[in-house]
Amino acid sequence: IQSWLRGLPRIMFGPTRWRGKATPGFVHADEFGRLDEKLGTFSANIYLNLPGDEPGDKPSPLQIFPLSIHREEDWEAVAPALLEPLSAQDVVSQVAIRKALGDPVEVDARPGDLVIFCVQRPHCAVGFDDGVRVSLQCFVTHKGPEEKLLIDC
């Protein structure tokens, strides 16, 4: 018997809780580990439907912040500004996180696109007022070149 992992379906209906200029999405990190080119945990997202799919619209369903923590010193430099806000779910904390992290990278995904990114970097799904976002998501853990990839949905 062969089983096929299909991923976790995510369906978001607008209006979403986190949307607007000050807090366009809920910034978080799924794992607080150092970045390492030999291992890591990644999120794989296939976007099936996005709000604003009409020609000329720019749905930008994802923001990723280019924070790179490779050493203990890197974490110590940002921890005071980020640790408490990243563990809270309020507007004041989200504004503080965005101020500390600076501008995110906007991912311009379209229906049918697969986006894979490191979950140790702060990121957010961008909120919206109207429409529906449908995606499939799973985590991929890479523990080194000699190990098999672990797919967790």
Image (cartoon, helix red, strand yellow):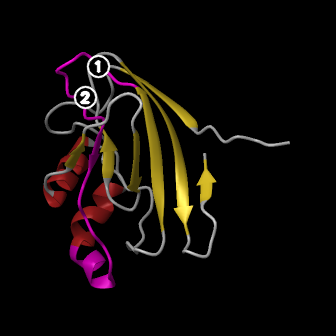
Q: Quadrant of the C terminus?
A: top right
Q: Which residue is mark 1?
A: 53
Residue 31 sits above or below residue 51 on the image: below
Position of 134 compared to 78: left or right?
Answer: right
The residue drawn where x is 45% and y is 41% is 45
Q: Is residue 79 left or right of residue 149?
A: left
> Image quarter for residue 21?
top left
* Depicted 35 relative to depicted 103: above or below: below
Residue 79 picture location, percent across and down: 27, 71
- Residue under label 2: 59
In reply to whether residue 62 is colored magenta, the answer given is yes
Task: Give the image location of residue 140, x and y in percent.
Answer: 54, 56
- Provide the secondary structure element on which disc 2 rests: loop
Q: Residue at x 25, y 15 (%)?
A: 54
- Check disc 2 and give the amino acid type: Pro
Residue located 25% across and 38% down the image: 108
Expressed as whole percent of the image width and height from the top left, the position of residue 30 reads: 44, 56
